[in-house]
Image (cartoon, rainbow, N blue to C red):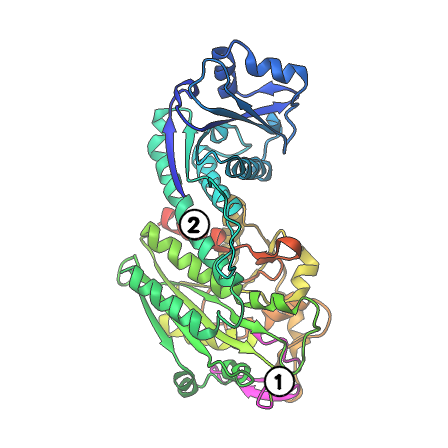
Amino acid sequence: MEFTAKSGNPEKQRTACVVVGVFETRRISTVAEQLDQLSDGFISNLIRRGDMDGKIGQTLLLHSVPNTLCDRILLVGCGRERELHDAQYRQIIAKSATILNEIGAMEAVCYLTELHVKGRDNHWNVRQAVETFADSLYTFEQLKSKKDTTRRPLRKVTLGIASRRDLADSEAAVKEGLAIAHGVTLAKDLGNLPGNICTPSYLADVGMALGKEYNSITTEILEAADMEKLGMGSLLSVARGSREPAKLIIMDYKGGKADEKPIVLVGKGLTFDAGGISLKPAAAMDEMKYDMCGGASVFGTMKAIAELNLPINVIGVVPASENMPDGAANKPGDVVTSMSGQTIEILNTDAEGRLILCDALTYVEKYEPDTVIDIATLTGACVVALGKHASGLLGNHSPLIHDLLNAGKSSGDRVWELPLWEEYQEQIKSPFADIANVGGKEAGTITAACFLSRFTKKFQWAHLDIAGTAWRSGDKKSATGRPVPLLTQYLLDRCANK
């Protein structure tokens, strides 16, 4: 899909559809006023008659409006003008995208980017519009024999800006939005693929493909034998129950100076999680194909930053495996030795994500990283605590936590900090090993992070638990692509603050 930014009067737009806003109660936006004056009050007469009152979610499609050059005008309800905030803005952009795609407009000029959103600027409006259009029109039909194709899908959107002085900034915002949208789409596609296709080997191939597509990325794959030599007994113990060999995928993006320490992203790549011997209940087990969404977000972020040519060094690491029940699988009570040398008592084989992440976290010490962020669909407890709106955030470095919180607010891909106090470490003590892999029913998200913290003593580290935000359930079941926007925004901020 093509996006451009353009300044220009709405009455001069020869296009299939012009999109403008209507506020509560029945007050048309500045751009709509221009079209209204041109049409001798055609729009305001309809509004006054009660055809629309401007509530968010309302739309009204007008055909053949007098004295205009466009085929149609789409009026979109924007709520109360002075109360328009981030979520409402995305909601009205998403509604516009859906309607435009349904009516067969194919191309449109959208002036909703000129709306005033509380605390936001033109750059934010334009970038969010691009990301929201792409998100709203995403479909996953690769595996259907008969696709539900739209007859005349929306292919081009021109985003209106108020002043030519904002043109360069808007073009940069379009570029950022498109790169993030492409990264989100990759993460969604990987998440939505079933476990019989998206295996650890498949993810390794995706990593290699990114290395071929972008000269700035070099990809390396560690096989089971390589990991055995490194002493990754924790990661490999999870893979023993599967016929699919484990992979450790390393993507090295070099955009900064050669001596600049890298930021490392470590994403959990469990391509299917049956729970192992601690077998999950059958209901909704199909959704455990999404247990690799942390890894998918790393692939998506690497793609986004490579498209943007960010001047920064980033290493993406994805430990990939399945967790299946088998005669060779981990058993509750087993003790394994991690790459760090710490021994782990496995009390629950369904707490496997931390077992593959801990060895990956030890592995990345070799890069002497500036910062390490791990991303994982780690605990159901996080879903209970925060629901689907915010990802859980924990870590050992306050400035890093602060930066991620700010990146979440800016990108709309929000996180919420949970405590990582020393008292919680008591819950993961083991009488038979250095550490237990679960800490009981209480504070499950925190004790999982406590486990990972034992392997992050040598660097600044943050942990993102995306179990509630990585996918949607129900009749619209799909991966969300989160937290690609958050991670990309964090890296953009790091570049801006250099």
x 57%, y 58%: residue: 470
Question: Earlier along the polypeptide chain: callout 2 or callout 1?
Answer: 2
Q: Amino acid at mark 2?
A: Ile
- Asked whether 389 falls inside the magenta stretch, the response is no
Is residue 328 located in the magenta-colored stretch of the structure?
A: yes
Residue 458 visible? The answer is no
Q: Quadrant of the N terminus?
A: top left
Q: Residue at x 39, y 49 (%)?
A: 179
Residue 394 placement (x, y as % from top left) = 57, 61
Chain part drawn in magenta:
327-353
Residue carrying label 1: 345
- Disc 1 element: strand
Measured along the vertical axis of the image, is residue 160 above or below residue 352? above
Mark 1 Cα-neighbour bin, 10 Å: few <14, some 14–19, many ≥20: many
Q: Amino acid at mark 1?
A: Glu
The answer to which image quadrant residue 336 occupies is bottom right
Tell which of 58 and 416 is nearer to you.
58
Q: Magenta part mainly helix, strand or loop?
A: loop
Disc sitting over residue 180 in the figure: 2
The tally of labels here is 2
Q: Is residue 407 above or below residue 152?
A: below
